[in-house]
Amino acid sequence: MRIDRRIIFVLIAFSVAIPLIFKIGLPNRVTKEVRMVYDAIDELEREEVVLVSFDHEASSLPEIKPMADAILRHCFSKDLKVISFALLAEGTAIGDQILRDIAAEYEKRYGEDYVYLGFRPQYTAAILGLGEDLHRVFPEDYRGISTSELPLTKKIKNYNDISLVISIADGDLPSYWINYAEARYHQRLAIAVTAVMATTYYPYLSSGQIKGLVGGLKGAAEYEILIGKPGMGGKGMDAQSIAHLVILFLVALGNVSYFLGRRNNSKGTG
Amino acid sequence: MSHIFWAEEIIQKAQVETTCATGRKMEIGTLISALLTLFVFSFLYKDNPFYKFAEHLLVGVSVGYFVVVAINTTVLPKLFLPLFKQGNLLYLIPGFLGFIMFLRFSPRLSWISRISLALIIGAGAGVSIPAFMQAQILTQMKASMLSFTSFEGIVVMAALCTTLMYFFFSKEHKGWLGRTARVGTWFLMIFFGATFGYTVMSRISLLIGRFQFLLGDFLHIID
Amino acid sequence: MLVQFFIPHRSFIFAYENVLDWMQIIYVFTLLVGVANYIKINSKKVSTKIKGWGYNLVALSGLLVMVILGFAQGTGEDTPFLWMFNHIQAPMQATMFSLLAFFVASAAYRGFRARSKEATILLLTAAVVMLGRVPIGNMIHSSIPDLANWILNFPSMAARRGILIGIGLGTISTSLRIILGIERTYLGRE
């Protein structure tokens, strides 16, 4: 049986749109790997410094933003100090806006409670450079203010002053953090990646090289449950469930028609 | 200074609210985003001029964005500031090595740009040896040994050994090696299957994001 | 860079820190060379008016507008540059990638068949993970998410670990070949 691909497209569009309009409210379950990220942040003391790296492009924004929102809400609610930057150019503007918006929710002050450092290319050199001297890698922040003058960054020399690094990524940049910051400087690291990359990082989770893993929109929805603040992640879970069911139904249909066709062929020749 | 604020004025004018399909107020920016989103979605029917327009505009704008961010956040503070404001002449070296990259456009002089490439690739190779040895080989092997005390530990060890056998190409995959490598492919299929499942999840999540925008910000059907 | 890891002498550290700094600067120039090449190719198409040159003009105009806005009025909050990024670049790029949801569904229907033992394992694992990772999987049967977790944390993880170790060994051998001058293809040599 052949179905025109446009019918499949319409099915997918409806399977996403209808649950967004008519909410079902399917209950979500928190997984161990997301709870590990939550615990890694939750066990930090007030005023400890967290580095959030926006290692992604604009293309993955619908997955990245809910994760970044939830993690930053947790950091600011715990009164942690946040320094942040981007290792991919497009993450620069996104990181700046997300950080600014969430900091405003918690009435945090720029320069004292959080700082945004902007973009740095050549991730290997940037990650290794931070292990030596932050001020050398980032002489100025994103706004052009010297990092030696900002109250938060002037106290930070290198990874020794950073309690946790969180890489929010849509590619293989967390593996650079693991290879160069974790392995070389023993920097504690947690990651939040788009679902497409999540399976790649399970060996690092098992070996303890990363302290936790938030994977895609589902991971964001779980994190929202943990911090008790509903967001975009949870809102999308009904649509995610129904779309998966529709795709599995299509796969089953394709296989049934394949096996029926094969049986008919063998009957014909037999 | 006022002459440079012309674009801000245009944007402020653009932010004047307009009336959307459902009769509610919305920004021009949202309308433009929605139109461009629909232009891209039009590719699902077939390739067309609207999609081509959106595609080329996207690439052009993205390249322009990169130029500004790269120069503002890297070239100016990391090269021009130490070189011209602080007078650190050591920065003439990366400045020169960066500049000679542009010699790639000259067929006669393009060989000079290889010096810069050699520095980046050589330095990358130098730092990668201890990093990969530590993070990807020793720590990973150690983690596998420690988990060898339970059913899961045995599964992990079996999967790891057979997968590595599959990637061992120095001997023909026949006999016991062939059988072990075959088991390795089953474990690899489990990994690829799980990755496929997550890939579907990821792509659907992106679509949900766009539909949330279209149904929410644009049409105001959902919150 | 390698020697500094084993012998952290002052002179090696000085060289190491400087080279790390230089790498970031040179790297951004290599990317800007790509940009220059993009402008060159598009300008040529526009000037020779080859078929579809109007689209190349759109691309060049987009680039030029972003550059002018970015340098004239900055990139911070409430700037036209950020407005362009938020309302043109980011939504289009996210939509471009979301198209893949439709194509993945279509490809799954057409090509995801249990033709062999390997294909069946692939299909079943994908089905368990797709169901187990969304709330509805838990509603169908509470053991589906547990099974998905088990797959991800043990057999799938171990297979990926095998790939990782292979990549690690490959990277180290390639790096050694580069350092020893055996591998020179990146310089355009055989």
Image: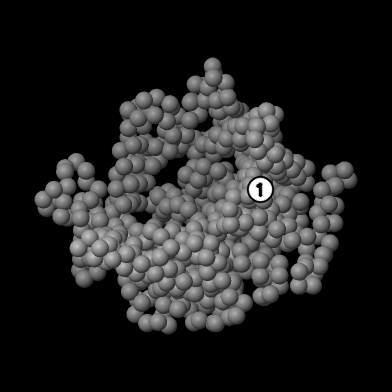
With B45 as the anchor, is B117 left or right in this view? left
- Work out which residue is located at the far left of the displayed protein and give it: B175
Instruction: Inspect the image, locate mark 1, and give the three-letter code of the amino acid beneath it.
Output: Pro
Q: Quadrant of the N terminus of chain B?
A: top right
Residue C180: horizontal and vertical position, in percent? 33, 29
Q: How many marks?
A: 1
Q: Residue at x 82, y 48 (%)?
A: B7
Pick the residue in front: A33 or A141: A33
Q: Secondary structure at mark 1?
A: helix
Pick the residue in front: C84 or C96: C96
The residue where tag 1 is placed is: B49
- Work out which residue is located at the far right of the displayed protein and give it: B2
Residue B187: horizontal and vertical position, in percent? 26, 60
Q: Residue at x 78, y 46 (%)?
A: C73
With B211 as the anchor, is B122 left or right in this view? left
Pick the residue in front: C99 or A191: C99
Q: Is residue A220 visible?
A: no
Q: Chain of mark 1?
A: B
Residue A111: horizontal and vertical position, in percent? 67, 58
Q: Residue at x 66, y 48 (%)?
A: B49
Residue A161: horizontal and vertical position, in percent? 52, 57
Q: Quadrant of the C terminus of chain B?
A: bottom right
Q: Residue at x 58, y 53 (%)?
A: B46
Q: Is residue A79 above or below residue B185?
A: below
Pick the residue in front: C148 or B87: C148
